[in-house]
Image (cartoon, rainbow, N blue to C red):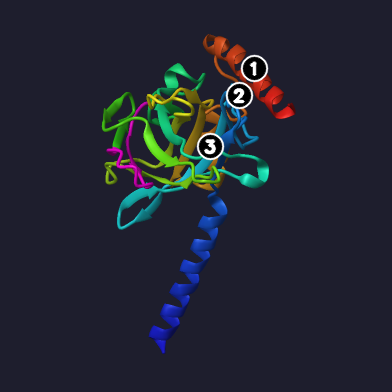
Amino acid sequence: MKNVCYFATLGLVLSLLSTQAVGQHSDIEFGYDNTSSPTGFVIEQDNTTFDGIQYFESEFDEFLGDFFADDPGFVTNDAEGLLVNSGDNVWINFLDASSNSAFGVGFVNYYNPLTDTLQAVGRISVTDNGGGGTADLVINGASIESGVNPQFLGTGDVDGDIHDHVTFDLLDDGSAPDGAYGVLVQLQSDFDTPDGNMDLNSDAFWIIFNKGMTEQDFDEKALLAFGVGAIPEPSSASFLVLGASVFLLRRRRKNR
């Protein structure tokens, strides 16, 4: 009887955890700004940092000591007019945030809760789950360590739809500290380029992963370090002008 109660309780706990995980993760919806003659991507998200960069939240799940995430995924949305063209290939490109954000410091941007700062430390591997055969990418705080960047996402089907995930694996699990890990990325496409070059790019956006922090600390401390509700130092004033320009450009595209 005790065993029956134990397994029933375990099943309930796993069910609740699964429901909670589903509630916390959602796919990133994207598509061309105009499928007939695209000039860029639309990334569906209203939340931005102080310098105008969109951001998405996720968390590293743990299984037998391995910390990884395959969310958020990436998906087009026909109902909202977010599509690519059939046969177009889309990749996810990882950026050095120190050159593209007023707050970022590298390829892996680690929020250290002990010092309340962002640091260019940590190692993350990125694995293509879409069957594109792209060699795994490994990025560390300051550089691309190995593999291929950008990582393949998928090819538009006959309806212009794509739905794919990549796996973000936090390496050095035993020594990787709790905190938040952020990567700054953009989507790229080979639209109308017979040579296969990725000439169509989205604006940069953050994906920020929670590892071991309470939800309150993640929201109020970690996200603040990435520029969510924060004001950057005066030395970053040039990024404010860039951020404002990006925000106004997005508003114009949405209002067309």
Residue to which mark 1 is pinned: 244
Q: Earlier in the sequence, mark 3 or mark 2?
A: 2
Q: Is residue 64 above or below residue 217?
A: below
Marks 2,1: beta carbons within 8 A: yes
Q: Nearer the viewer, mark 3 or mark 2?
A: 3
Dot 3 lies on which element?
Answer: loop
Residue to which mark 2 is pinned: 52
| Image quadrant assignment for residue 28 | top right
Residue to which mark 3 is pinned: 85
Marks 1,3: beta carbons within 8 A: no
2 vs 233, left or right, is left
Q: What range of the chain is rendered magenta?
A: 120-136
Residue at x 30%, y 27% (from the top left corner): 144
175 vs 117, left or right, is left
* Numbered label attached to residue 100: none
Please say whether residue 226 is visible from this viewpoint: yes
Amino acid type indicated by mark 3? Asn
**Rendering coords of residue 123 (x, y %):** 31, 35
Residue at x 53%, y 41% (from the top left corner): 57
10 Å neighbourhood of mark 3: few (<14), some, or many (≥20)? many
**Rendering coords of residue 217 (x, y %):** 53, 41
Q: Earlier in the sequence, mark 1 or mark 3?
A: 3
Dot 1 lies on which element?
Answer: helix
**Rendering coords of residue 222 (x, y %):** 51, 35
Dot 2 lies on which element?
Answer: loop
Residue at x 53%, y 50% (from the top left corner): 25
Near-viewer residue (120 or 214) = 120
Residue at x 37%, y 35% (from the top left corner): 151
